[in-house]
Image: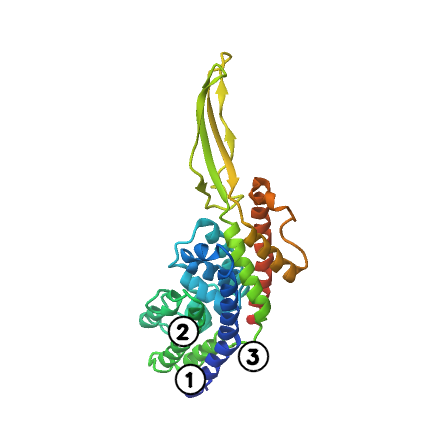
Amino acid sequence: MADLNKILIDSEGIKEKWTNYLAFPYARAYAKALIQFKETKGAQDKLSAQRAEFGLLALTICSGGVLTHVFAQTAWKAVAANKALNVICNNNMQKAFSVAHFASNNKVANFVVGAVWDTGSKVIDDKTKTLFEENSVNFPSTQQWLTETDALTSLMGFVIECYLKYQDTARNIFNNSKLTTAERDDAASKLTGSKFANPPSQSTVNEARVAMEIELLFYLRVVMDLDFVQQITGGVAGGVGGSVTPGPKVDIKPMPGSPEYPQPYNRSHATPQGIGTIDVQQIGYNPLGRAFYDKINTLHTTLYGNNMLSSRNWDDFFNATMNQEAFMAANRAISTLESAGMTRFQQSIH
């Protein structure tokens, strides 16, 4: 027969394990990565306007496990991230939650109470469902991801929020007069079988390596913003006169390969008399900068044994071909980081 007191007492140890084996080590790794990144010339400007976006990207791609993914899923809804990051993170989350067999749209509920969530209104009433709505009222920790120290307080806060909701659900099950003893025991069994109720028995976070992975991801995030689209228009007359007007460089939000990614074209034309128009759209890449270039290669070599970017002279740092290479290499490197994060995710659910 299920025992409410035992479930509540056991939940204390569950909370401590999530805190000690995931929240603490992951937050320390994140803080170290953020401090190192901020010390790089030009990084602070990039970070200031997009701090939450950087943090949630790290939580998703360089995952510490199922807890950080669920946290990111909840917090991501409040961040106005660009389309490229939405594509990357949503794809990653879908793969991760598929591995974890999270069928419900409410990932926090799926994580905390497991199969109880799908048992119907007799067990999970409207009041309980309201507790799990993924918003900042129920989960204020998800809105605090702003500084190095907040990384720790946010993850710890999220663990406590999940712990309290786990306890509330247990009490609701045992105080529900509509349930038979068999139904109550079944619901209690499903609750204690949830992912939250089965925390890791030791940390799977290699702090030093995860810190380097997160820092590398921060630089790759910068590289992802290098590309721009520019239109050039004008006219010529007699082959000797006219004007050419370069348009503004507009940042590209979609990822390469997306149907929304702009395509270059040349629609210029001229008559036999040499009178015509210039209408060109080109894709360009802003300079990466020496400091970012060096840090990317240093981290990539330490992690994987080779440079990510080809070795070039300083004169080449403003070369468009080089910046395009950096852009494409960054997208490949993100996939590598994603694979490592997925491995940690799988370790955290078995």
Front position in the image: 165 or 330? 330
Cβ atoms at labels 1 and 3 below 8 Å apart:
no
Residue at x-position 54% and y-position 58%: 217
Q: Secondary structure at mark 3?
A: loop
**Above or below 192: residue 210:** above
Asked which quadrant contains residue 178, the reply is bottom left
Q: Earlier in the sequence, mark 3 or mark 2?
A: 2
Q: Is residue 230 left or right of residue 341?
A: left
Identified by mark 1, the residue type is Leu
Q: Secondary structure at mark 2?
A: helix
Task: Where is residue 58? Give x, y as percent.
Answer: 50, 61
Task: Where is residue 52? Give x, y as percent.
Answer: 42, 60
Distance from Cα at disc 3 to Cα at disc 2? 20 Å
Q: Is residue 200 left or right of residue 72?
A: right
Q: Is residue 121 left or right of residue 336?
A: left
Residue picked out by circle 2: 157
Q: Earlier in the sequence, mark 2 or mark 1?
A: 1
Badge 1: how crowded within 10 Å, few (<14), some, or many (20+)?
some
Identified by mark 3, the residue type is Ser
Q: Residue furthest top?
A: 273
Residue at x-position 45% and y-position 46%: 253
Distance from Cα at disc 2 to Cα at disc 1? 19 Å
Residue picked out by circle 1: 8
Q: Quadrant of the C terminus?
A: bottom right
